[in-house]
């Protein structure tokens, strides 16, 4: 089997301070196996487990096998926090790989910080956060959202309708989008939300029809996307009429959708399966060899896979898998993975990456229509507001939603743009 993990030859897997223990290194894999987010998170867990299996096949780490402890977040952000505590205290894991929604990450964050532990989070997010205990493998707004908005502003129109799931990531992302579109001289013609996992999307589609929108910015997560795009097409809104730019819709979700409902629309990511360079082709071949030739791969899967190797390299450098020691060595790590070179910024533990826009094909893959000329440094806090203003924005929503990061009760929040 062809591999591209020469960064971890067997000879390097035992450090200079040789480990006497041969007990497994336990790691947590915390993703939703059930619920509305399973459509997105199960494939990410599979990519994580593939990287672990490859490292084990090459001798493990520090002469020890890696033992994954796989748990179900069940699409419930509060459960993510409870299970993270269980993984650290009861299961004795040395790292947690996991999370998708920002609501779930925000429940894990205080847990790993309280234990001086380590989370590797694989998904693009809204920014407005930085933690010494989290490696953010996904894009910040300046690596995904803002470049994509500028491309659409220049090429497709200046009137934007913002739609998202009703939790903290879409509200925060849309606040940043509104700031930037206004700065560019564009117009926000509407903003609507649907419950995470909900299907009541017809009122949103009707509002889009009446708005005069030229571009839809979509931050819906999970299987609600099936209902949303179906309703758009049922209402006669096509990608040629009003293109949709999705920020959380990848090849993994497209595999479960009617491709005619999404053909011609767009997504912004930092990786697409259709990239033809050697490391990605090898990655796709190995994953499909295990899970089936029909399976597709996504940006969060590529990030999660590479994240395991970034962590493993830091373990080797530290000579131990103890989280505090690994944290001291994970900054400035880099790994040549499916998305190209992935660098961890030592200052904020976010990753450097290229921004890309893809257009959906009829085979459920993407044609690359634009990419940044160089890799982009991560800026967690969007510059349109101060850190304190963003923190107050987040806390206002948290308080307004009954001290949750997900608006499960349907509270009406007036987003201040």
Image (tube, rainbow, N blue to C red):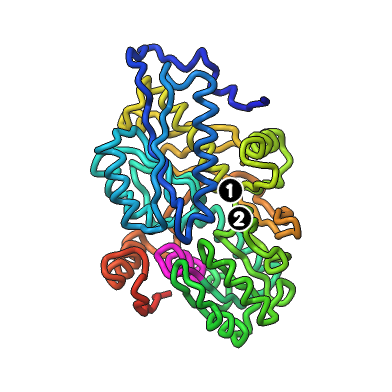
Q: Which residues are magenta?
A: 164-179
Nearest the eye: 39 or 184: 39
Residue 348 appears in the figure: no
The residue indicated by pointer 1 is 299
What secondary structure is marked by label 2? loop
The residue indicated by pointer 2 is 250
Instruction: Report if the CB atoms under discs 2 and 1 are less than 8 Å apart.
Output: yes
The x, y position of residue 49, in whole percent, is 50, 36
Q: Quadrant of residue 254?
A: bottom right
The x, y position of residue 266, in whole percent, is 66, 62
- Residue 127 shown left or right of residue 177 in the figure: left
Image quadrant occupied by the C terminus:
bottom left
Q: Main secondary structure of the magenta part?
A: helix
Residue drawn 51% across and 67% down? 177
Residue drawn 41% across and 29% down? 67
Q: How many marks?
A: 2
What secondary structure is marked by label 1? helix
Residue drawn 55% across and 32% down? 335
Q: Quadrant of residue 263?
A: bottom right
Residue 133 forms part of the magenta stretch: no
């Amino acid at each position: 089997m062809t591999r591209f993990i020469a960064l971890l030859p067997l000879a390097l897997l035992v450090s200079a301070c040789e480990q006497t223990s041969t007990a497994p290194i336990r790691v947590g894999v915390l993703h939703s196996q059930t619920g509305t987010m399973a459509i997105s998170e199960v494939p990410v867990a599979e990519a994580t487990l593939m990287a672990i299996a490859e490292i084990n096949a090459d001798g493990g780490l520090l002469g020890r096998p890696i033992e994954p402890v796989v748990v179900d977040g069940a699409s419930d952000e509060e459960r993510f926090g409870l299970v993270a505590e269980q993984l650290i205290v009861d299961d004795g894991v040395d790292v947690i790989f996991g999370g998708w929604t920002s609501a779930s990450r925000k429940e894990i964050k205080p847990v790993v910080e309280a234990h001086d532990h380590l989370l590797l989070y694989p998904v693009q997010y809204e920014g407005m956060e930085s933690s010494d205990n989290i490696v953010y493998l996904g894009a910040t707004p300046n690596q995904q959202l803002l470049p994509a908005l500028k491309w659409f502003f220049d090429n497709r129109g200046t009137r934007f309708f913002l739609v998202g799931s009703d939790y903290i990531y879409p509200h925060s992302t849309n606040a940043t989008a509104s700031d930037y579109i206004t700065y560019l001289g564009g117009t926000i013609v509407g903003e609507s939300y649907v419950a995470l996992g909900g299907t009541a999307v017809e009122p949103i589609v009707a509002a889009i029809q009446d708005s005069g929108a030229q571009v839809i910015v979509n931050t819906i997560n999970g299987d609600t996307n099936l209902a949303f795009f179906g309703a758009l097409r049922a209402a006669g809104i096509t990608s040629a009429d009003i293109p949709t730019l999705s920020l959380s819709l990848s090849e993994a979700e497209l595999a479960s959708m009617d491709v005619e409902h999404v053909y011609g629309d767009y997504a912004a990511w930092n990786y697409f399966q259709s990239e033809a360079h050697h490391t990605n082709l090898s990655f796709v071949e190995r994953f499909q060899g295990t899970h089936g030739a029909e399976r597709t791969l996504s940006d969060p899967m590529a990030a999660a896979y590479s994240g395991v190797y970034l962590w493993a390299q830091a373990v080797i450098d530290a000579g131990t898998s103890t989280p505090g020691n690994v944290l001291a060595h994970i900054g400035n790590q880099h790994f040549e993975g499916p998305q190209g070179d992935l660098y961890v910024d030592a200052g904020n533990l976010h990753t450097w990456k290229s921004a890309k826009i893809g257009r959906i094909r009829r085979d459920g893959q993407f044609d690359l229509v634009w990419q940044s000329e160089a890799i982009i440094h991560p800026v967690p806090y969007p510059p349109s507001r101060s850190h304190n203003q963003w923190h107050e924005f987040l806390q206002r929503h948290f308080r307004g939603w009954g001290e949750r990061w997900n608006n499960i009760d349907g509270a009406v929040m007036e987003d201040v743009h």
